[in-house]
Image (cartoon, grey):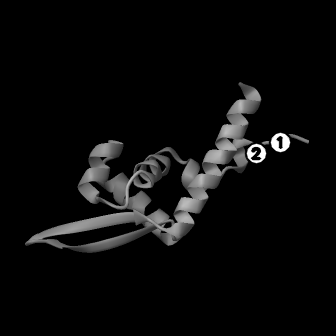
Amino acid sequence: MADFTLPSKFDRMIHQPARLAIIAVLAGCESADFTYLLNATEINKGTLSKNLSALEDVAYVEITKGYKGKIPNTSVKLTAKGRRAFAKYRRQHRRFIDSVG
């Protein structure tokens, strides 16, 4: 039996390209605001918003809405569950790549 997980069995919530980009950016920081994520991932506003909601629904991210002065601000951070899921995804991905490399 193989010592890796097939890509078809990877966490679909993370494996989708837009969500993978979001989680990868968030994994490198404590939190990020919507504008930063928009620029860092190069995802359009609607797609970013939709994917952030999906990640929030499975408790991979925590979204906080507030204001910076009088300007609305949305801040996003990975939850502990999200960090664990991303670490597992990365391990599975590495093992798979190593097995076919």
Would you place residue 68 above or below residue 90 in this image? below
Name the residue type under label 2: Thr
Name the residue at 76% across, 45% down. 5
The residue that mark 2 highlights is 5
Residue 20 can be seen, yes or no = yes
Q: Give coordinates of residue 3: x percent, y percent.
A: 83, 42
Q: Name which quarter of the figure residue 41 lies in.
A: top left
Q: Quadrant of residue 95?
A: top right
Across and down, in percent, residue 32 comes to 31, 58
Say what secondary structure mark 2 lies in.
loop
The C terminus - image quarter: top right
Q: Residues within 10 Å of mark 2 (few under 14, many from 20)?
A: some
The residue beneath circle 1 is 3
Residue at left offset 62%, top offset 50%:
89
Neighbours of disc 1 within 10 Å: few (<14), some (14-19), many (20+) = few
Q: Is residue 38 left or right of residue 62?
A: left
